Amino acid sequence: MKEIVYLVGKDLKNFITDARSLFLALLFPLILVFMVVYVYPSGGEEDRGKFTFGLVSQEDEEGVSREMITFLEKVKSIPLQSFNFEEAYQRLQEEKIEAFLFFPSDFTSRLYSGENTVIEVYTNPENVKGRLAALRLGQGLANQISYAQSSFELVKRQKGISIEELAERVRHGEDFQVIPSLVEPVSMNFHNIGPLVPLNRVNWALPAFFTMFVFLASSLGAVDLVKEKEHRILERLAVRGTTKGIILGAKFFSSFIKGMVQIIFLWGAGIFIFNLYPGSSLFALFFLSALFVAVASAFSLYIVSTASNSSFAFSLGVISSLIMAPLGGCWWPVYLMPPWMSLLGRLTPHYWANSAFSKLLISGGDLEAIAIELTTLLIFVIALYFYSVKKFDYV
């Protein structure tokens, strides 16, 4: 026990007296948060609470898309306007509309034939909120069309009538009983449970930089222990009877304590300086942060056990951190990533931590809401720690 305390104390002393380490772990993340919250231009985010979308169809008046557009224009909750393609494209460039949905000329024919059909969404990539809203609208329409297409196909098989005839009956209000959902429509009521989370950039910026720099600082901290391997210090400890469990345990606890300092400093600054919303459960925020610190500490042991020299340990720590950060949603929101990147991101602890932080700080969730993320992070800790202990050698 005395050996662990001594080794942890030595590591913490080196951390406290190293100005560069303190700057990287504590001050630099807050500088980036300040730039994101106060310096980086908002791009009119506050004025984008209301959206106007365009609807464009290349079909004739008998096409299904034309009837859909006529119906959608009557929806009062979403401002929708019908244009031709050139007019909609020009309005999008002039930022008079957020996006427009485009129905191709073969939309109805492909729908009736049971083939995959397409709704194209044109957006301005700089208008993130408008783009997300347009994608949500397009996806909702696509889901409804897919459901209707499946229902028509099912009724076609049972009733022995064509999809065109079935659609014609539904269009003119005849024989509604052929589709059960039209007889007893289902409505959905949405209820907000918990507090309404105020819009504040720090609520997504600080968690992203927290996960990035906790992981980076912990990874770079492994370099010192690798240097001790190079200088045969660990070999002399082994001669004195110090087990590798004690050495790695001391390294894990020292890295964990440094991470806890980052938790107190960064979250404290976020709450008291940047007006961060800490979520409905401060304990959940602290527990999640501590668990991610444990993952970062276990990964530092992986570097110690894998790296053959300090140069490789430094490169492995930096490269791993810079690869995992964007994949895990530290540089941009996870929901903006393409599917292949989102899939790769699930292999990083950053992804699960940022997903959980989003649920806590943006959605107002509690500890139960992030149970899956917490379990995944715990698996990371166990896997990395035991692999490192098995792989570690004194030289």
Image (spheres, rainbow, N blue to C red):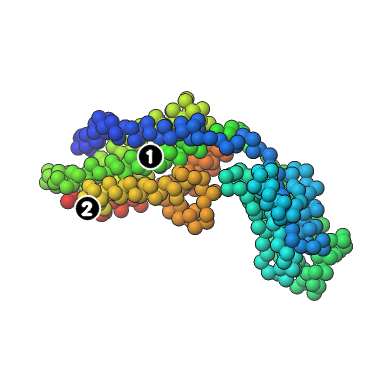
Please state the horizontal and vertical placement of residue 52, each as a whole percent of the image.
Answer: 70, 44
Residue 211 placement, left or right of 196: left
Q: Secondary structure at mark 1?
A: helix
Residue 59 image position (x, y, % from top left): 76, 62
- Disc 2 and disc 1: Cα gap in Å? 24 Å
Q: Amino acid at mark 2?
A: Ser
| Number of marks | 2
Q: Which mark is residue 213?
A: 1
Mark 2 or mark 1, earlier in chain: 1
Q: Residue at x 83, y 69 (%)?
A: 165
Is residue 46 positioned above or below 241 on the image? above
Give the left or right position of residue 151, taking residue 226 as reference: right
Asked whether 249 or 18 is in front, the reply is 18
Q: Residue at x 41, y 32 (%)?
A: 31
Residue lying farthest bottom? Answer: 160
Asked if 387 appears above or below 258 in the picture, the reply is: below
Task: Give the secondary structure at mark 2.
Answer: loop
Crowding near the residue tagged with mark 1, few <14, some 14–19, many ≥20 C-alpha atoms within 10 Å: many
Residue 308, disc: 2
Label 2 neighbour load within 10 Å: few <14, some 14-19, many 20+: some
Q: Amino acid at mark 1?
A: Phe
- Considering depth in this image, is 22 or 377 the residue closer to the camera? 22
Q: Quadrant of residue 295?
A: top left
Does 176 sit above or below residue 204?
below
Q: For this view, does 172 lie left or right of residue 354?
A: right
Q: Position of residue 110 (x, y in %)?
A: 71, 68
